[in-house]
Amino acid sequence: MSAASTTFPLQERDIPTHWVNLVPDLPEPPLPPLHPGTLEPAGPDDLAAIFPPAIIAQEVSGEPDVELPEQVREAYKLWRPTPLFRARRLERALDTPAHIYVKYEGVSPAGSHKPNSAVAQAYENAQAGVRKLTTETGAGQWGSSLAFACSLFGLECEVWMVGSSYDQKPYRRSMMQTWGASVHRSPSQLTDAGRAQAAHASGSLGIAISEAVEVAARDPAANYSLGSVLNHVCLHQTVIGQEAIAQLELAGEAPDVVVGCVGGGSNFAGLAFPFIRRVLRDGARTRFLAAEPAACPTLTRGAYRYDFGDTVGLTPLMPMYTLGHDFVPPPVHSGGLRYHGDSPLVSALVRAGIVEARAFRQNDAFAAALQFARTEGIVPGPEPAHAIRATVEEALAAREAGEPRVILLGLSGHGHFDLSAYDAYLAGELEDPEFSEADMDAALARLPQAPAIG
Ligand SMILES: *Cc1c(COP(=O)(O)O)cnc(C)c1O
């Protein structure tokens, strides 16, 4: 490929055959999740009420490389390999010597990275004879991804959608229904968890998770499916980073810094883990930068503690950075980043100093998103807008240093269903909430009784 190339295309045969499991390469073995009742380490059996055996095996796997089932790889061919391109126009607009490469996951049917895991989860549940999957969705990205995946493998799909997003993004609901899913506004009247949280009318991911888990746990033919946070979801997403490694090889480059946005951590993990493995195994010198919203600053301001994954406390306790399981983030437009906790694996990497985290204000993220749209054409989702902001800062730092640094940006999805947020930004009416010390103190006071860590 010539030095002037902008795109670095791969073929179907280049879709990875294995997922990258970073666990065996970590400097320390990960801490176990704890059973919510006994506070003892939760074993695979504790997950069997809501997950199929193959997914549980992936969740606790110690194998460095986990083989993709052939039917999942076949389904990936509907949109993979995804593009990697060099953002030359953005580089010029920033007058930076940095080389900015963008790995774009918005070409999937649902418009984000999330089908990478949805397809794998729907396949394994169908194999296990499950008839229905329940789940929560924030911005609607995960719900639409799972609805799409369930349609491929003949499963029913029932989705609890966070109230504020349900109101802001009616077309995401239409999309889920088009793929055959049923969609409820959360908190709903259909579950004990929803009825108990009726006062939080705008909802939160934590509440919606409680509702979906409750329904799956009481229906033997139904399982639950989570779109982020857990190890197996991070695992499924590693097709992103593996393809990016091959594409950057075509470009003859290696990244100095890898940048992604973090909600529950899965797209960041998917892009970064294959590169982090090179750092841990081969001493590659790469920085990793996780971008999050200032309104929900889990990695930069949260406590590293055991906490529940959901609001009500039905899930195992996980070791992670958390703002408290009942923290209800302000209704910012990056719905996919409104989660109180984070992937235990990503949290451990932040704790170990391998991944650096930075928080960005909503308006700053949208300013960067507009600059990106006006130079590179793609209208980004509000979530990756935070990573674009971080990329712009890195590119300006490279200019300052006079160094042609190589930046790899994970563009996790497009913003075609988020145009009401763009409207608000363009009208100068986008709110810019921040997290306060009082919020943090209140959240810490409500953390569950569990062994302290580190
Ligand atoms: C859901 C979502 C995110 C955040 O989730 P992660 O699990 O942290 O990746 C980021 N970007 C987009 C486009 C999303 O849909």
Image (tube, grey):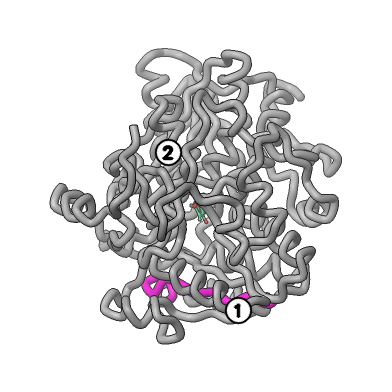
Query: Circle 1 sits on which residue?
Result: 219
Which quarter shows the N terminus? top right
Q: Is mark 2 within 8 Å of ligand 1?
A: no
- Callout in the foreground (2, 1): 1
User: Residue 300's x, y, as percent?
Assistant: 31, 39
In front here: 101 or 323?
323
In the displayed structure image, the side of residue 97 where residue 163 appears, left or right: left
Q: In the image, what residue type sits under mark 2? A: Ser
User: Residue 178's x, y, as percent?
Assistant: 65, 78
Q: Mark 2: few, some, or many residues within 10 Å (few <14, many ≥20)?
A: many
**Residue occupying image coordinates x 68% and y 59%:** 121
Outermost residue toward the left in this view: 438
In the displayed structure image, the side of residue 451 where residue 369 appears, left or right: right
In the displayed structure image, the side of residue 181 where residue 14 appears, left or right: right
**Majority secondary structure of the magenta segment?**
strand
Q: In the image, what residue type sits under mark 1? A: Asp
In front here: 204 or 404?
204
Magenta residues (range): 156-166
* Above or below, comparing residue 263 to residue 431 in the picture: above
Magenta residue check for 163: yes
Callout 1 secondary element: loop
Q: Quadrant of residue 19?
A: top right
User: Residue 197's x, y, as percent?
Assistant: 32, 76
**Residue occupying image coordinates x 59% and y 65%:** 50
Query: Circle 2 sits on which residue?
Result: 347
**Residue occupying image coordinates x 73% and y 40%:** 66
Q: CA distance from mark 2 to mark 1?
A: 32 Å
